[in-house]
Image (cartoon, rainbow, N blue to C red):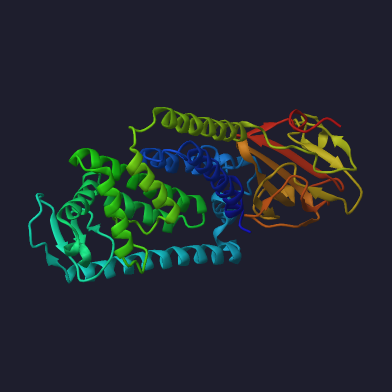
Amino acid sequence: MDSLAMQFTIERLVPWIIFSGLVYSATAYFTRQRNTSTGVWWLSLLASFLPLLPLSYASVVVTPLNVNWINTSIENVQMIKHATIAHAGLNDMDYVVVLLAITYAGIVLYKLIKLALNWRRLKVMVGETAPLAVKASSKIKVVVSKFNHSPFVFGAFKPLVVLPQYFSSMSENRQRILIQHELTHIAFKDPIAVIIWRVLSALFWINPFVGRMEWQFVRAMEHRCDRHTIARYGMSKFEYAQTLVQSLRKAAVTYASPVAQFNSTALDADDYKQRLTHIVDGEKSTNITMVLGVCLTIVSLSGAVLSWDLLSGSVTPNWQHPLTDYRISSPYNNVSKIRFYKPHKGVDYVAPIGSPITAAADGVVIVADGQTLHPNFGNTVLIQHKGGYQTLYAHLASISLKPGDWISAGQRIGVIGDTGRTTGIHLHFEVMRDQQRLDPDTVLPKM
């Protein structure tokens, strides 16, 4: 799989889903008795996306190559330019990644089209409505349809209240309850919120907890609307509850509606039982202890994610030696005649013919050939690691990978050899950080 896609999946996508589950579970626990605050679900949704923020995602960033490594021919300078494009991946992108991306986009498109078709069906139904015979005491337009359904609000910016056919058979008091419930939804801009949640659930279908948060939001929205409608218009709680029961019995719901409505399609029998209980028993204002509990839990979980992100972005790679059976023939800063008495800027490992060379740390392959870098290096592999580190492996007899590959520490990258300018079979190994050569002994584990 393409390195960038693999890194995103491991470091972002999976933690996002797990973290979303933790946030959802914590919020659901604190709101299990009094789910009346829509704000806590907006907060939970926003907090759940924290693992996707690029706090340390760029931990493996391709840094410029040391000019002493580069083959100075114009042709090879162009090769360097292409090799150092982030993770060198587009031309060699794994077909599996492309297929998965197309599949994901296809499912998103299917869900959005389904949502749009439902909206269109509602629009057609609204077009066949008639104005309410007795004008409601509101500037909001109120219409009555030819079908039995739940009363709902249609339209985001110019909303109108759509009442069912059975509305005319209800008592005047219950008619007033239905209308004022929908007007309360409009006052809180619930129709817009429901549309946003529906779209988000479609876009992020891969995360089941986004859908669960939407369901909890709708529950909280209806509880809040019930409470405020009763309080604002001085209604009888028992009459209000009986109106809800009557509406449930008469409404015929045949599809999920992307609108705010009196008896929501997102709720089940248990939800309505709890809703009726809250209506009859009465609700206090939002429980401050509950809100504080949710906020503190989210802050704690977010702090843990931030700490992990910052820690994972700041630690050095998980270093290991590139060979297991070896001896050092020329240490770092060694001065010899073959190098014209210049300090040696790497370490030379001598090992038996055919010995495998392995990656010194996790990273992305930037160069894997015998032409891109200086010809003295022969067959060379250059790997970019997190923290601005790079490692170079020169004089290889053969190379086992290609630019753009994501590799793990200890994974085979080639075989020891004597290509390039060399006095015998060995591995020339260098470590750099931010274009500054380092003594490999300062990062590699002691043997």
Q: Position of residue 250 (x, y in %)?
A: 29, 65
Q: Residue at x 38, y 68 (%)?
A: 114
Quarter of the image that includes the N terminus: bottom right
**4 or 77: nearer the viewer:** 4
- Count the labels in the image: 0
Q: Is residue 316 visible?
A: yes
**244 or 221: nearer the viewer:** 244
Quarter of the image that includes the C terminus: top right
Q: Residue at x 7, y 56 (%)?
A: 135
**83 or 122: nearer the viewer:** 122
Left or right, 374 with reference to 420: left
Q: Position of residue 423 (x, y in %)?
A: 85, 45
Q: Position of residue 411 (x, y in %)?
A: 76, 50
Q: Position of residue 19 (x, y in %)?
A: 55, 42
Q: Residue at x 66, y 36 (%)?
A: 432
Left or right, 35 with reference to 374: left
Q: Is residue 214 visible?
A: no
On screen, residue 407 above or below 342: below
Q: Residue at x 48, y 36 (%)?
A: 30
